[in-house]
Amino acid sequence: MAQDHEQDPIRAYKNYHWIVWHPDLLGGKPTIKGTRISVSQVLGLMSKGVTAEGLAEDYEGFPKECIPELLQFASEQAAKPLEPSDVAA
């Protein structure tokens, strides 16, 4: 039976102001508060050279001040040990 999450609040990740989560928001991906932009989307664009200013121009309402927090979040995620299933054979 599918769960109805409409009444569930959008929740902030612990120790973060800009990164939020809801099971029905972007498929449960970490999302930037007040937007429908995922953390992974921003990091992917930045890895291709898009600047904070460029993101703000392309995505109305994008808060440039969230960038340091997104980089910290990515750093913490990358520091977690991998599972054997995460690595190519």
Image (cartoon, rainbow, N blue to C red):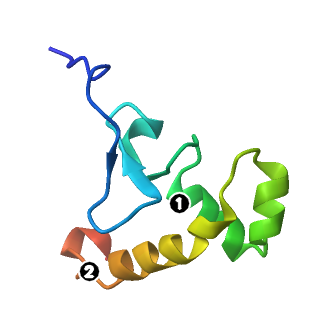
Compared to 38, does 84 lie above or below? Answer: below
Q: Specify the amino acid type for callout 2.
A: Lys
Screen quadrant of the C terminus: bottom left
Query: In which quadrant of the rendered view does residue 85 lie?
Result: bottom left
At 58% from the left edge and 43% from the top edge, which residue is drawn? 35
Query: In which quadrant of the rendered view does residue 47 lie?
Result: bottom right
Judging depth in this view, the residue of 89 and 58 nearest the camera is: 58
Indicate which disc, 1 or 2, sits on the residue closer to the N terminus.
Answer: 1
Q: Tell me the residue that label 2 is attached to.
A: 80
At 53% from the left edge and 51% from the top edge, which residue is drawn? 38
Looking at the image, which residue sits at the far left? 1
Q: Determine the secondary structure under disc 1.
A: helix
Screen quadrant of the N terminus: top left
Residue 4's label in the rendered image is none
| Residue 88 in sight from this viewpoint | no
Badge 2: residue crowd in 10 Å (few <14, some 14–19, many ≥20):
few
Q: Tell me the residue that label 1 is attached to.
A: 40
Q: Real-space Cα distance between discs 1 and 2?
A: 16 Å
Q: Is residue 12 left or right of residue 4?
A: right
Q: Could you tell me how many numbered marks the image carries?
A: 2
Residue 63: x, y in percent?
Answer: 65, 58
Residue 62: x, y in percent?
Answer: 68, 53
Q: Are marks 1 and 2 in contact (CB under 8 Å)?
A: no
| Residue 87 in sight from this viewpoint | yes
Badge 1: residue crowd in 10 Å (few <14, some 14–19, many ≥20):
some
Q: Specify the amino acid type for callout 1.
A: Ser
Q: Determine the secondary structure under disc 2.
A: loop
Q: Is residue 8 left or right of residue 60?
A: left
Residue 58: x, y in percent?
Answer: 82, 51
Compared to 34, does 85 lie above or below? Answer: below
